[in-house]
Amino acid sequence: MKRTRIRDIRNQEFISATLSATFERGFHAVTMADIARKLGATAASINYYFGSKDRLMAETMTHLLGLLRQEHVMALSQANTPKERLRAIVEANFSDAFFTPEHCTFWVQFWSAAPYSQSLTRLQTINRARVRSHFRHELKHLTPVHTRETIRRLIQSYMDGVWVSVAQGERKVNAPHARQEAFAMIDLVLR
């Protein structure tokens, strides 16, 4: 069994503190000192582990992308048909563990900052390509070629819209309700 290194534990603590502090103060307003205070640490200790706020934010998003990947793998492992796999992709994005106001807030604010940072843009590009690929793979079994891309954009835009509305505090949507709405929308567009 692999032992957990102190550095890995500390990184996880800083990532959790980053999510919490960003939720309270906002992506651009939060400082290294705000994040460090969450842990009773110093900004210098964050610099030691991450080097910069930009790198900490990128590592936090990498952590969230890892959580999303785990949710995808778990949901897809239980799906058999193309429609079930399509629903599993959506289900992962609205899973109980992943779809939280704290995660929504960080995610949306991160993507708004991504065009201004090369490392953040890289993560955004990878994530968008992965999401597109998942949807396209399942939709090719469910829709005619001339409607496939429109349906993919509709589903993806719907999911992004829910995340934005939760991040802005516009809607109080829990994960089961978000999944229910998303499944109804999929049924509607696949008719």
Image (tube, rainbow, N blue to C red):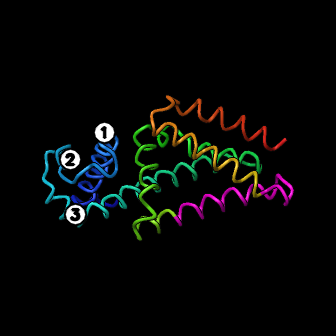
Question: Looking at the image, is mark 3 or mark 1 earlier in the sequence?
Answer: 1
- What is the x, y in percent for residue 19? 34, 46
Q: Which residues are magenta?
A: 125-148
Q: Nearer the viewer, residue 36 or 166?
A: 166
Left or right: 154 in relation to 144: left
Q: Is residue 133 magenta?
A: yes
Left or right: 37 in relation to 86: left
Q: Is residue 46 magenta?
A: no
Mark on residue 49? 3
Identity of the residue drawn at 22% across and 63% down = 49
Q: Nearer the viewer, mark 3 or mark 2?
A: 2
Image: 182 above or below 34 = above
The secondary structure type at the circle numbered 2 is helix
CB within 8 Å, label 2 to label 1:
yes
Residue type at the position of mark 1: Glu
Name the residue that disc number 2 marks: 34
Name the residue that disc number 1 marks: 24
> How many residues crowd mark 1 within 10 Å: few (<14), some (14–19), many (20+)?
some
- What is the x, y in percent for residue 128? 57, 61
Image: 24 above or below 140 = above
- In three-dimensional space, the C-alpha distance between marks 3 and 1, rounded to whole angstroms, equals 23 Å
Identity of the residue drawn at 23% across and 60% down = 7
Residue type at the position of mark 2: Asp
Q: Nearer the viewer, residue 19 or 110?
A: 110
